Image (cartoon, rainbow, N blue to C red):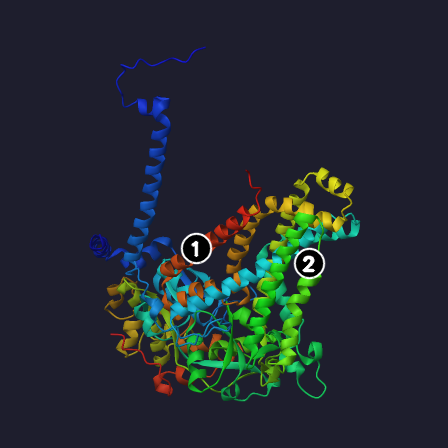
């Protein structure tokens, strides 16, 4: 059967836009685009009309007005005299902090759980399955509230630490206090000369990196492996330690102590922060574990058998043969889990953590009544962060993929 | 382009000048009043054991519904948190907001709301556990404070601690119930909100006597019902139903004796109850006996106060400044003329 060929003399007819396969695809796309734009403009027009009905305008001037409210967790200087814009920034940093710490914990946990789920040990494998299914199949909001409830209900109030025979005592030589308002750690105080120490530490790390590079090269050239872990650990720790004592211990610890209603000084990790970060990390780690498992299982069994026949030990097989190949499969879906964690952090208000949703999208929105503007800014922020994370990990991912020559 | 946009906006605004002007007609067509109340503020708006909405704000809405329909039950209550209340009102999800809301300049102007008056003169207070040994707010330096987000109390708190050179740590919560839970769990030393709400919350705690509402009041919180900008007639109706309840107390008209005023020589009472010749309530589109029905619904202002906040309710809030001006308070209605 031969396809009918159109005579070239046939003139263009309007109906051909739909009947002729040469034009149909294009005209359908144009129609779809027109419909899409019509709906979009209708939505925008509707919004403007309704705002006008309410006698409201669209203005972002409120960002430069005095906020007037306080925020408990601030990574940058902020008082109630600061602007709404600053309050939003404090919230943004709080969001990023949770996302950053959460992603790190989730990755480490997910990696371990994912590998252990493949363990030949029945109990370990089943325990990890239970962990994964438990966290994956319960809504994240419930986990956040649950962890928060555990942290506040089953820990002592700061008052319990008072008195000659207190009901609760601080852990680790009177340095860490776990209370129902958060956990207090000793904070490092830098005295004069501490910067030399930091410099020395930084240089040691650089030296260790060079050593590892050298060791890798050595291995490539001669096949001998050097004890990189032990040598680099010593290189990092020793010079700094020697300098620390030589300079008369310029870094001291500031211990938290009970004063009035609360503990003073030290580093205060609020329960809201802990609950949100831990719940997000546990929840996301369950998904990451499954990705890790899938990545490992996707590496052909022949690879590990070949490595074993060469005499490599199981842990070497995992770190040298399996994981490098599995990473190529693991990294892309990891992105979406990092994005999910970041976006899920907007549930912070459930435990009173002041993230950007809580400051800009919560208190500022309420005090100024600028719902549309605040929501647009919030959406813009989450969009920007998500795109940034994606592009960063995509860059990272490229260095892992097999280079095709 | 920008000019064009603004021009279109202005044109739309002008064209739309009277679109929200028919709230009364909308309410009548719907057959019930949509009243935004708190999701749970003892004394102001709660749900009793039988599932019925009760409270000071609830009774005001019932009076308003009675004025419009002659039926105090023709009202649907919409529970709103402090964070969504203004949005809900602006978007038309409720016809009126009676949700212990403080009347402030920016809410009146920037948020485009119209406050109908003050139905409760409140102030911000603090509640602490007695075992803490705190007797005054000046001893709260360094305390952790539970506070509802998106309220005026949040701003007062910041101002008050700054003025007095004290520090504090805010623990933000979504509503009264969450604040209460955090406070009881000891996640904060003190819970701050309007003193009336603190009293209401305290009596509902398991052991009310273990808790103390500190004597200091750190702010003015005139609470009142409000409607959105743009419908003055609807605002007038809400305002004068509130005034009618206040006047009724002033004149001694109660739920029980409301039918015995037919022969009074007081012309204002006749105007109020619609027993005279004229029909001044037609001016706002209400039936002649609207205020009669409103007062009959839950009694006058004093009765509503006693039943929900006063001795009868168990919350035991004193009338104080909320007494009628004839009894030493500052409740004073313009004349019903």
Asked if residue B116 shows in the view, the reply is no
Compute the Cα span from label 2 to label 1: 39 Å
Question: How many residues crowd mark 2 within 10 Å: few (<14), some (14–19), many (20+)?
Answer: some
Q: Secondary structure at mark 1?
A: helix
Report the residue that reaches farthest toward the front: A222
Toward the viewer: B293 or B96? B96
Q: Quadrant of residue B212?
A: bottom right
Circles 2 and 1 on the same subunit: yes
| Disc 2 chain ID | A
Left/right placement of residue B94 relative to residue B211 reads: left
Toward the viewer: A193 or B217? A193
**Disc 2 marks which residue?**
A228
Toward the viewer: B192 or B238? B192
Look at the picture and state if A321 lies above or below A270: above
Left/right placement of residue B209 relative to residue B69 reads: right
Report the residue that reaches farthest toward the top: A1
Marks 2 and 1, the one that precedes in the sequence? 2
Q: Give the mark toward the camera: 2 or 1.
A: 2
Toward the viewer: B224 or B288? B224
State the image coordinates of residue A309 (x, y, percent, origin top left). Answer: 78, 41
For the point 27% across and 76% down, which residue is it?
B268
Asked if residue B265 shows in the view, the reply is yes
State the image coordinates of residue B270 (x, y, percent, origin top left). Answer: 29, 73
**Disc 1 marks which residue?**
A384
**Quarter of the image that includes the N terminus of chain A:** top left
State the image coordinates of residue B264 (x, y, percent, origin top left). Answer: 30, 78
State the image coordinates of residue A47 (x, y, percent, origin top left). Answer: 32, 52
């Amino acid at each position: 059967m031969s396809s009918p060929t159109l005579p070239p003399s046939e003139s263009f007819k309007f109906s051909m836009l739909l009947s002729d396969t040469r034009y149909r695809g294009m005209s359908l796309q144009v129609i779809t685009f027109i419909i899409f734009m019509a709906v979009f403009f209708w939505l925008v027009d509707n919004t403007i009309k309704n705002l006008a009905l309410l006698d409201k305008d669209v203005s972002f001037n409120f960002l430069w007005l005095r906020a007037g409210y306080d925020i408990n967790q601030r990574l940058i200087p902020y008082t109630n005299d600061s602007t709404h814009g600053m309050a939003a920034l404090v919230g943004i940093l709080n969001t990023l902090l949770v996302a950053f710490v959460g992603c790190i914990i989730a990755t480490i946990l997910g990696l371990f759980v994912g590998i252990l789920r493949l363990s030949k040990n029945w109990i370990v494998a089943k325990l990890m399955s239970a962990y994964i299914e438990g966290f994956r199949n319960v809504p994240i909001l419930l986990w956040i509230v649950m962890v928060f409830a555990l942290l506040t209900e089953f820990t002592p109030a700061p008052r319990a630490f008072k008195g000659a025979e207190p009901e609760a005592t601080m852990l680790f030589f009177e340095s860490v206090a776990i209370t129902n308002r958060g956990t207090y750690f000793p904070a490092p105080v830098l005295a004069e000369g501490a910067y030399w120490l930091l410099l020395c530490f930084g240089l040691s790390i650089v030296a260790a990196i060079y050593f590892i590079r050298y060791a890798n090269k050595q291995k490539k050239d001669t096949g001998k492996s050097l004890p990189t872990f032990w040598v680099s650990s010593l290189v990092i720790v020793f010079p700094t330690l020697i300098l620390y004592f030589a300079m008369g211990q310029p870094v001291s610890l500031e211990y938290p102590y009970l004063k009035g209603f609360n503990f003073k000084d030290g580093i205060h990790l609020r329960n809201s922060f802990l609950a949100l970060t831990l719940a997000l990390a546990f929840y996301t780690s369950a998904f990451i574990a499954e990705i890790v498992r899938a990545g490992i299982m996707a590496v052909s069994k022949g690879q590990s058998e070949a490595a074993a026949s060469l005499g490599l030990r199981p842990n070497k097989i995992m770190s040298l043969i399996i994981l490098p190949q599995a990473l190529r499969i693991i990294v892309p879906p990891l992105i979406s889990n990092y994005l999910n964690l970041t976006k899920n952090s907007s549930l912070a208000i459930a435990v009173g953590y002041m993230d950007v949703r809580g400051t800009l999208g919560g208190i500022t929105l309420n005090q100024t009544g600028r719902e549309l503007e605040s929501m647009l800014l919030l959406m813009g922020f989450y969009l920007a962060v998500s795109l940034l994370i994606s592009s960063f990990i995509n860059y990272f991912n490229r260095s892992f993929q097999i280079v095709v020559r | 382009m920008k000019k064009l946009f603004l021009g279109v906006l202005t044109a739309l605004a002008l064209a739309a000048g009277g679109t929200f002007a028919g709230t009364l007609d909308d309410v009548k067509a719907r057959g019930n009043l949509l009243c935004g109340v708190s999701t749970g503020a003892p004394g102001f708006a709660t749900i009793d054991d039988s599932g019925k909405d009760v409270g000071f704000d609830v009774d005001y809405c019932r009076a308003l519904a009675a004025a419009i329909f002659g039926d105090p039950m023709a009202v649907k209550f919409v529970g709103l948190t402090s964070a969504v209340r203004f949005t809900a009102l602006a978007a038309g999800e409720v016809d009126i907001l009676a949700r212990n809301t403080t009347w402030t300049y920016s809410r009146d102007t920037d948020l485009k709301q119209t406050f109908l008056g003050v139905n409760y003169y409140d102030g911000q207070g603090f509640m602490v556990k007695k075992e803490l040994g705190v007797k005054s707010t000046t001893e709260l330096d360094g305390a952790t404070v539970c506070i509802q987000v998106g309220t005026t109390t949040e701003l007062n708190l910041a101002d008050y601690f700054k003025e007095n050179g004290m520090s504090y740590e805010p623990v933000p919560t979504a509503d009264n119930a969450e604040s209460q839970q955090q406070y009881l769990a000891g996640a904060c030393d003190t819970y701050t909100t309007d003193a009336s709400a603190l009293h209401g919350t305290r009596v509902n705690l398991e052991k009310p006597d273990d808790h103390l509402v500190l004597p200091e009041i750190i702010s003015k919180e005139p609470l009142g019902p409000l409607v959105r900008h743009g419908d003055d007639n609807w605002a007038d109706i809400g305002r004068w139903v509130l005034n009618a309840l206040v006047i009724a107390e002033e004149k001694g008209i109660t739920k029980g004796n409301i039918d015995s005023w037919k022969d009074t020589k007081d012309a204002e009472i006749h105007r109020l109850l619609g027993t005279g010749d004229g029909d001044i309530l037609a001016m706002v589109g209400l039936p002649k006996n609207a205020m009669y029905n409103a007062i009959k619904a839950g009694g006058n202002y004093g009765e509503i106060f006693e039943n929900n906040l006063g001795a009868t309710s168990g919350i035991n809030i004193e009338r104080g400044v909320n007494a009628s001006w004839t009894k030493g308070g500052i409740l004073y209605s313009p004349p019903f003329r």
